[in-house]
Amino acid sequence: MDSPNHEDWVLMQAVAEGDEAAANRLYDRFGGLVFKSSRQVLPTTAEAEDAVQEVFVRLWKTAERYDPTRAKLVTWVMLITRRHLIDRLRRKQVRPANLSLEGDPEGRSGAPSKREGSIERDEHRQRLLSRVAELPALQQEVITRAYLQGFTLREVAEQLESPLGTVKSALSRGLARLRDRLADEQRAADG
């Protein structure tokens, strides 16, 4: 086993044993990447931050399963991140959002009601889906299948009978276009 993979394995074994310093090193290495991925998928920074915390709990609980002969540590971390984000999106689609703990359950405090929050989320989702529909066909298909339907990029490549590299590029370009378009809309709304 080469040195970086062995060091990753040692790190994950220390995390599995509850070594706080090792967990901190793991977070320092991958926290930003997990946050960036979470923020691309989730509508708010707060949700992305929650997702990061949940992903690192998953990493801690499954650390002993890391096998450096099967994948690099970054690949394994991102696989767990992706699975978590897909699970989170599916849960949001299946059940209604929880009440905010910040507001009065009767809605007397002036905080948005549950219904208003739901309407905002639905509007955000519809805007996002309409922006996805504006993308070139391949980017649209890849994003829909990978993020909304939960397929791996390899599965998407097989379904579309396209090279994996082409699918990865389409995903990257599509997400960049979505981020740019949504950022432009946000600036226009703020300005």
Image: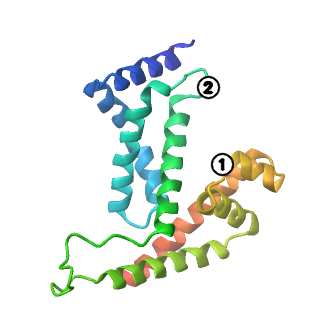
* Mark positioned earlier in the residue sequence (1 or 2): 2
The residue nearer to you, when weighing 120 against 128, is 120
Identified by mark 2, the residue type is Arg
Q: Give the quadrant of the N terminus.
A: top right
Q: Secondary structure at mark 2?
A: loop
Question: Tag count in the figure?
Answer: 2
Tag of residue 185: none
Q: What is the C-alpha distance between the residues marked 1 and 2?
A: 17 Å
Question: Residue 33, how many percent across, how many down?
Answer: 44, 45
For residue 140, which quarter of the picture? bottom right
Q: Residue at x 22, y 69 (%)?
A: 101
Indicate which disc residue 152 carries.
1
Within 10 Å of the Cα at label 1, are there few (<14), some (14-19), or many (20+) other Cα atoms?
some
Residue 70 pos. (x, y %): 61, 25
Question: In the picture shown, does residue 28 fall above or below 66?
Answer: below
Q: Which residue is mark 2?
A: 70
Q: How is the image coloured?
A: rainbow
Q: In the rendered structure, which amino acid carries the disc numbered 1?
A: Thr
In the displayed structure image, the side of residue 126 where residue 64 appears, left or right: left
Which quarter of the rendering shows the C terminus? bottom left
Q: Position of residue 170 (x, y in %)?
A: 69, 57
